[in-house]
Amino acid sequence: MNQTIKELSDLLARGEASSAELCQDYLARIERLNPRLNAFITVDPDKTLEEARAADARRARGEAGPLTGVPVAHKDIFCAEGWPATCGSRMLADFVSPYDAHVISRFKAAGMPSLGKTNMDEFAMGSSNETSFFGAVRNPWDERAVPGGSSGGSAAAVAARMAPAATGTDTGGSIRQPAALTGITGLKPTYGVVSRYGMIAFASSLDQAGPMAPSAEDCALLMNVMAGFDARDSTSLERPAEDYARDLDRPLKGLRIGLPREFFGAGLAADVGQAVEAALAVYRRLGAETVEVGLPNSGLSVPVYYVLAPAEASSNLSRYDGVRYGYRAAAYADLTDMYERTRAEGFGAEVKRRIMIGTYVLSHGYYDAYYLQAQKIRRLIAQDFAEAFKACDVILGPTAPTTAFDLGAKTADPVQMYLSDIYTIAVNLAGLPGMSLPCGFGADHRPVGLQIVGDWFGEARMLNVAHQYQLATDWHRRMPEGL
Amino acid sequence: MQWETVIGLEVHTQLTTRSKIFSGAPIEFGAAPNTQACAVDLALPGVLPVLNRGAVERAIKFGLAIGARLNRVNVFARKNYFYPDLPKGYQISQFELPIVEGGELAIQVGDASKVIRLTRAHLEEDAGKSLHEDFHGCTGIDLNRAGTPLLEIVSEPDMRSAKEAVAYARALYNLVTWIGICDGNMQEGSFRVDANVSVRPAGQKEFGTRREIKNLNSFRFLEQAIDYEVRWQIERIEDGHAIQQATVLFDPDSGATRMMRTKEEAHDYRYFPDPDLLPVRLDDALIARMQSELPELPQAKQARYQSDWGLSAYDAATLTASHALAEYFEAVVAKLLVSPRPQAGEGQGERVAKLAANWVMGELSGTLNKEGLDIAESRIGAASLAGLLARLQDGTLSGKLAKEVFAAMWAGEGEADAIIEAKGLKQMSDTGEIERILDEVLAANPKSVEEFRAGKDKAFNALVGQVMKATRGKANPQQVNELLKKKLAG
């Protein structure tokens, strides 16, 4: 079961396994493990196998692409025709999408069957996957722990090898933080590289989809599937297609690694810091040099994010009004009452908290003080990175300040929860690409993630930096025991 | 006390794009409910807006046509509020940076002309429709209209009477249809007017508190609604009440306005830039292309009619009341100028234009009005009318006969020449024949001849009238005049 995308693809190419067989194996594992981990919201073996057989037929016709037949799981934030798209919410618990997201259509075009829809924090709002209407997801490394969020289901599914890879989305760290907490590799592309069409919006100016898989090489291959211009997303960037795997084998000699002093200060757990330092030692051995850089405004990332993301979310989530689709309260007195009950009952506490924050900061008289001010700081944060990249090629640091925390540990204190994204959020605000890859374990034997931040459109370089590390280490090959 | 009325208008014009402003769904009117609403219009989870360039192009044309400033970078914003026919829970509109700012429009009320300043014009999407009548105890939602492109055109509070407001609305209507950005179909809601109305004691500098009359879809209702609202406001104030800022609706049946909501109940729309759409950037090439596509504008035509053809300001304004009318008029003139012209030479253009203007504004417009038709529906085309006027010009027809031929043409009896031939209406120009009749008339009216010789000019006209009667109007009056003068002098 511990095979990379590349290995599975080779297996299929050599005819040693069919897509249907692979899917059956993964479906069996999902059936066995999902009751414990709750990583999937929807599994539909008939649909999966139908897609797998179509992939096999395609291969038989000699029309297979590089990844045809390799199955993936999709975060339940993506709309896929005929599949539910719940977004982890009661509001959309019964919503079945009539259309495919751009990302889904890309996977279909590549002939990659869907293993199902993975659990997530409600509307991607959370860092522990505990806000899901469909229940918390457990961390395969330690079932007392959270898998991180919001792409916690995708992360747990990959970590437990219930899927060889999965899609995620990252608004403030929602791919990287769960990847770190579950010991897998995850990549958030430069904003605009992957189309947001059909990806249920949380905060439009920050949301970006990306791959989650055991290795950087897997992520590169998946990026080749997911990335690309889409005219249906006005923020999608029209750029020449690129092969994200092209630089994987480039030696790291002379690589300049920037270490932001702000990412190694107070708040960073000692065991996480040690694992990151050990990773840096590996990089120095591989010929890279490290330079200290400053991101003076990054300390404002969390407050800026918690103005801008809720502002956009409060508007994005207005469409869930009980009128056209989704949840509607069973009984109500009039239109206003219908709206109020529907949204009170259909949304969970965290979503409601953010809608209220967002509504507040956009209100007359507060807009300038909060929203506009936050936009200004957002630009300063992006400028900090631009300045830093003059002195280095990539930025390295911890993905999250701690290893996975226990279920329930932070649910009573939203601010503590928000701070678990303290190193990832600035990357979204700047629109930069970022990755997390496993680099060891903490004192609690839970995984530690190393974050790589690339320059704008520096995905290939970032993947190269990650891949070279993974050639020199085996953290990404480790699997949780007892599954 | 003397009161002054202050009016500003907000006009929603529906743009003539084929598809919606942020989706590819068509915008044809009258389709079965919800058959022209795609995933984007329904605001399904995950869908995104994509701006229709055609809407931007039309807004640019409008800005150029009113001499406005075009914002090279303009921004779409979300206007957030809940309503069942607003699928996203926000309307995509423009707020702080609209595409068009400033500009002006000249209006004419009676003999007075005035320039109305425009504040701005911005692009936005229309909402859907709530259908309260057809569903017992329920409200139906039709999202066909949701996402229809609108240009909202906002004026300064520069109008001082309902008449001025109507003149402005008409001038604006003429302009947007003239440049082809709006089809002008008011029944289908392509041109909807909101009027902000306030009153103040004459001479006072500060504006009074305004009330906004929403959604007026005819010029008549606009005038009635403002007149009612002004009377109501003056009465309230004179009765010692203060006007409360409010939004009101006009009920055409009762002729009265009624309160919809007060300022306190107004929404906080929480505008912010739409993160799904990039700022719109207008480059020089696009603006130049739009400029080149603009037809000659009413003002320019009016100036040209006056300077080149010597038409009066009133005639020039009347003939440019719509693009179709001006085109018709110019086609008649053009045709006449190339037809054989016995009076060619100096002043030919002026003569021809005046003749065409008189007929287009007189006989033709009168007949169209009587039958409730638009110039586009005229039963006599421009070339045909020119054919008729050519016969008037070369003396074949008298004015009286020409009207007869016009009526026959309108009735579908054919072109002017064919009718003249068939009815034998050709003006008599055989001098011998006219002289013969003249002699008869002179012989039969010795008294008139005597009176003329005694110095009574009126007697001369009576004799001409007798000749015309005897020829059943077919004689050329000018010719009759000349011959008669000669005979009487002789």
Image: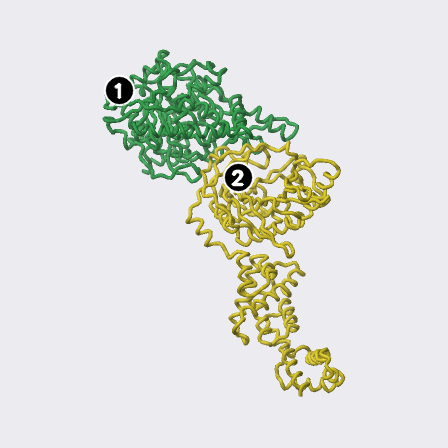
Chain colours: A green, B yellow
- Answer with the quarter of the image where residue B415 lies: bottom right
- Answer with the quarter of the image where residue B154 lies: top right
Q: Depth check: B9 or A42 in front? A: B9
Q: Disc 1 is attached to a residue of which chain?
A: A
Asked which secondary structure carries label 1, the reply is helix
Answer yes or no: is residue B250 visible.
Answer: yes
Residue A295 point in image, percent of width and height: 36, 24
Query: Looking at the picture, does residue A34 appear above or below residue A433?
Result: above
Mark 1 closeness class: few <14, some 14–19, many ≥20 residues within 10 Å:
some
Which dot, 2 or 1, sits closer to the camera? 2
Name the residue that disc number 2 marks: B93
Tag 2: amino acid: Ser
Tag 1: amino acid: Val
Asked which secondary structure carries label 2, the reply is strand
Residue B363 point in image, percent of width and height: 64, 66
State the count of labels: 2
Q: Depth check: B348 or A147 in front? A: B348
Q: Depth check: A371 or B471 in front? A: A371
Residue B178 point in image, percent of width and height: 54, 54
Query: Looking at the picture, does residue B370 appear above or below residue B265?
Result: below
Q: Disc 2 is attached to a residue of which chain?
A: B
Mark 2 closeness class: few <14, some 14–19, many ≥20 residues within 10 Å:
many
Name the residue that disc number 1 marks: A282
